[in-house]
Image (cartoon, rainbow, N blue to C red):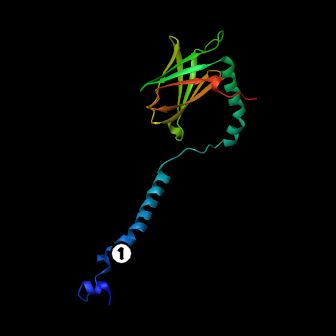
Amino acid sequence: MNTTTMKTGGNPTPWYKERWTWLLMLMPATAIVAGFITLWLAVTTFDGLVADDYYKQGLAINQTLARANAAQELGLVGQVKFSAEDVRVVLSVRQGVELPSKLLVTLAHPTRGGLDQKLVLELRDGAYLGSLQAALTSAHWKVLIEDESRSWRLSGVAFLPTETEIRINSADLKPVD
């Protein structure tokens, strides 16, 4: 004789009143809901991680390294300060080297290309100043500083909003042969 039958006095209880039935159905139901959520996220969001011109970007790496070496030869050091609305960069160079009147600053988000910002900073009172296009989200932002002719380049990383001021030193770069 069945224990279910004994509890109810000979009449079996329907399946939907059994606790174990619902417990056994819970895991597959959770997997189905999670699958639909994953599908919805995959369809509605764009990760932007894959570049269409990855081969050209790979070939251009030597130019990037040469620009980093040029910054090292000039003895460039950059102090970058972030606020809610703007960016301030103070550059120092080896004696006898003239600073440019404008800087190109790129703030690159690590995973979302749509959040990247390209800024033009103008020299005022010994510092380069520029306004942010939008507020920067919390992430490890890559900071690229270049002159207008793109002959040199400094690159660093800032974890925003924790680090509001970073120092990018070209001497920290490893020389490339």
Q: Residue furthest right?
A: 177
Residue at the (62%, 15%) spot, across then down: 93
- What residue would you read off at disc 1? 21
Q: What's the residue at 57%, 29% (across, down)?
A: 156
Q: Is residue 3 above or below residue 50?
A: below
Secondary structure under the numbered disc 1 in the rendered image: helix
Q: Residue at x 48, y 48 (%)?
A: 45
Crowding near the residue tagged with mark 1, few <14, some 14–19, many ≥20 C-alpha atoms within 10 Å? few
Expressed as whole percent of the image width and height from the top left, the position of residue 21 reads 35, 75
The three-letter code of the residue at mark 1 reads Thr
Of 159 and 83, the residue lying toward us? 159
The quadrant holding residue 173 is top right
Measured from the top left, where is residue 80 in percent x and y?
A: 52, 23
For residue 103, above or below residue 15: above
The quarter of the picture where the C terminus appears is: top right
Residue 125 point in image, percent of width and height: 50, 10
Find residue 28 and report its horizontal and vertical position in percent: 43, 68
The residue depicted at 70 percent of the width and 39 percent of the height is 58
Left or right: 64 as drawn, with respect to 160: right
In the orientation shown, which residue stands out farthest toward the left? 9
**Quadrant housing residue 33:** bottom left
* Left or right: 70 in relation to 37: right
